[in-house]
Amino acid sequence: MARLVTVAGLALVLGILIGIGAVSLDRAAHAPEARAIKEPDTSQQSSAPAVIEAPGRRVTIRLASAAPTSAPQIGTMAATTAEKLATASDGNIEIKLFEPNTLAPNAELFDRVADGSIDAVWSSPNFFAQRDSVLWLFSTVPFGPSASEYLAWLSYGGGQELMDGTFARFNIKPIVCTVLPPESGGWFRREINTVEDLKGLRMRFMGIGAKVMRRLGVETTAMSGGDTFFALQSGAIDAAEFSLPSIDLRYGFDKAASHYYFPGWHQQSSLITLMVNMKVWDGLADAQRATIMNVCGDNIRESLAEGEVQQVQALQEIRQRGVNIHTLPKPVLDALKMSWTQVVKEESAANPEFMKVWESFHAFRKSYAEWRNLGYLP
């Protein structure tokens, strides 16, 4: 009899415990945390389909660089971009970076990314301005803005919308991914004191700035970096515009000419752009597109800071090598600016797209001028 009472007692206690557990589980099931987990299951019973966030899939982008990846900033930032994207995306974005003329000749890169045979290109848009002169305005502008003013127009003055529209015609998504500091005004075998000194000068000059120089009687020619050095050293040309002091130093131009002029009136700041085939861009997950945009934004910060330091160091070494560093005389700069005004008129008359973008760019600069003049030291 005692054993029976004991068993009955144990059963009663066990029943009470089970009851308490059931109440606890029922309460837990109605807690907010539990509902967050359960809702996807119960939602399938409703008429609306379930929305499921799939994890970002891994993507590999074949990126052709138009500049050697060893070149300061214009090339090294391409490698930096690949590293940052791998880290920021937790491996979901892999960039396979190719040196110039590897996937296709440099001159064909724009067309190859447009037709999708190359996923993306790393370059300054002015490399491809023969396709459309408006690309110059999304690259660098003679007597143009500082980096901060350029970025202000792009981000808040309608520039990015115009840039997107221009590149969309070629099936390309453009993302500004690096900003370079001013270039030099060029290397000269003799001093330039007057506008007359420019007439008949044989000079390597690229981009829309070459049109400006030709109006002043300069015989311009386009050539690669290595060819430029040997032509200048041998006297086949009298002068050469090339790049930033840090890149000019790397190419050894101090051994080819002894007069180095500033400012780089033709390139006060330069935009380096990641150009992605539109089908590739549209096929990325939202998070992947956001990651690319964020990494390029961080590149702009890094390139602006790094570029300034690199030029300080390069100029110090160039001067130590015995090069004479000059400032272009004001009458020469004034003549160059007047020539640029004429080139703008010619390009605007010849290309409606150039005119449309120039009008936006010029209007923004006019509105910005008061702040630039009041807020900053001359």
Image (tube, grey):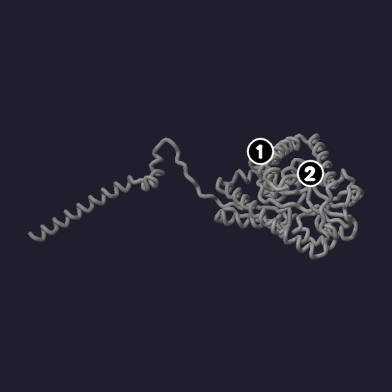
What quarter of the picture does the N terminus occupy? bottom left
Give x and y (percent) for residue 6. Answer: 12, 59
Q: Nearer the viewer, residue 296 or 322?
A: 322
Residue at horizontal 20%, vertical 52%?
16
In this rendering, would 369 be left or right of 5?
A: right
Q: CA distance from mark 1 to mark 2?
A: 24 Å
Give x and y (percent) for residue 2. Answer: 8, 60
Give x and y (percent) for residue 41. Answer: 39, 44
- How dense is the environment of label 1, judged by Cα within 10 Å: few (below 14), some, or many (20 and up)? some
Q: Secondary structure at mark 1?
A: loop
Residue at horizontal 82%, vertical 40%?
343
In this rendering, would 155 be left or right of 135?
A: left
The type of residue carrying mark 1 is Gly
Would you name the residue on which mark 2 appears? 130
In this rendering, would 318 be left or right of 40?
A: right
Q: Considering only vertical position in the picture, is 359 above or below 192? A: above
Instruction: Give me the disc on residue 148.
Output: none
- How dense is the environment of label 2, judged by Cα within 10 Å: few (below 14), some, or many (20 and up)? few
Q: Does residue 117 appear in the picture of this structure?
A: no
